[in-house]
Amino acid sequence: MIAEILSMIKKPTGVKCFRFFIGMILVLFLAAGRALAGPPLITDDPDTPGPNSWEIDVATTSAYVQRTWDLETPLLDINYGIGDHIELTCELPWEVTVPDHGGTDSGLGNTLLGVKWRFLDQTNAWLDVSAYPQVEFNNPTASVRHGLANDGTTVLLPFEVGHRFGPLDIYADTAYVWNQRQVTGGFCGVAAEYELSENFSVMAELHDDFETHLTNNELDFNLGFRRTLTEHISLIGSAGRAIFGPSQTAPGFMSYLALEFTF
């Protein structure tokens, strides 16, 4: 089903891009259901794991860009809750590139560390709102020289908002992104998740990456799912593609698949 929907997506231009983007946002808001946020989607929400709680995703990701598969396998995404409103995050991928023609290369990717603080709570205010400052840096390996990791330190300053209407949860994020050796930019996204049953839900998102002055926009579309296997283990996944964007970065296909452990 996901593949059929993705195959129907065309690459609109000009005014059609704007109308398509607004239309998809309305679809997401009208079709949304209960959300747990973040992976397997790109868009994050204000939720945190809870006091002394762990959320660990062991994932495999893929993106097909310019006749090359860029993989993260595995990607470790570790989150720990401090109190009701704080989350500590660490992400560490093993990067693999597989070109259509040529040899495969692999190495350790960049490490990302972050702290999420939900400073507005829906129990006291109409919205959940959080700030999620993050820093991404190189490890002392040859990955940058091999093109497996981004050069330089990156600072991300995201904000997330969300509102839960009983079983209905809608969330969005936006961020400023600074890198010491690349063009400054940012991103924004909107996402929704619909709980079909107690153990299974589906989700969708639109996510836009851009450089300063909103240039070189890349708009991505994702469909995903969450399947609860046991009390502490879930299978999560998504698949999508770029609707439009620079050919050197926009993926013709991308995916995420993980086991999520909570305890």
Image (tube, rainbow, N blue to C red):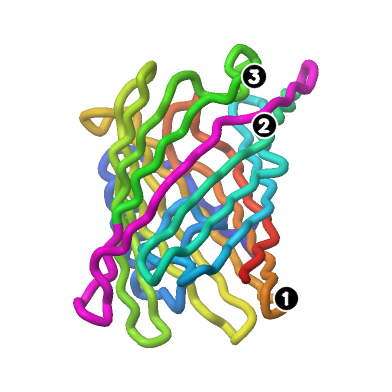
Q: Nearer the viewer, mark 3 or mark 1?
A: 3
Q: Nearer the viewer, mark 2 or mark 3?
A: 3
Left or right, 29 with reference to 214: right
Give the amino acid type for the residue marked by disc 1 in the picture.
Answer: Leu
Q: Residue at x 39, y 50 (%)?
A: 115
Observer-nearest of 129 and 31: 129
* Mark 1 and mark 2: Cα distance apart in space: 28 Å
Q: Residue at x 31, y 63 (%)?
A: 118
Observer-nearest of 16 and 148: 148
Disc assigned to residue 102: none
Q: Is residue 104 magenta?
A: yes
Q: Residue at x 61, y 12 (%)?
A: 145
- Residue topped by disc 3: 141
Give the amino acid type for the residue marked by disc 2 in the picture.
Answer: Glu
Split into 4 quadrants, where in the image is the N terminus? bottom right
Element under disc 3? loop
Pointer 3 local density, CA inside 10 Å: few below 14, some 14–19, many at least 20: few
Left or right, 1 with reference to 209: right
Coordinates of residue 200 in the picture (x, y in percent): 62, 78
**Stretch of the chain drawn in magenta:** 101-130
| Mark found first going from the N terminus, 3 or 1 | 3
Q: Residue at x 43, y 64 (%)?
A: 82
For the residues bearing labels 2 and 3, Cβ distance under 8 angstroms: no
Disc assigned to residue 95: 2
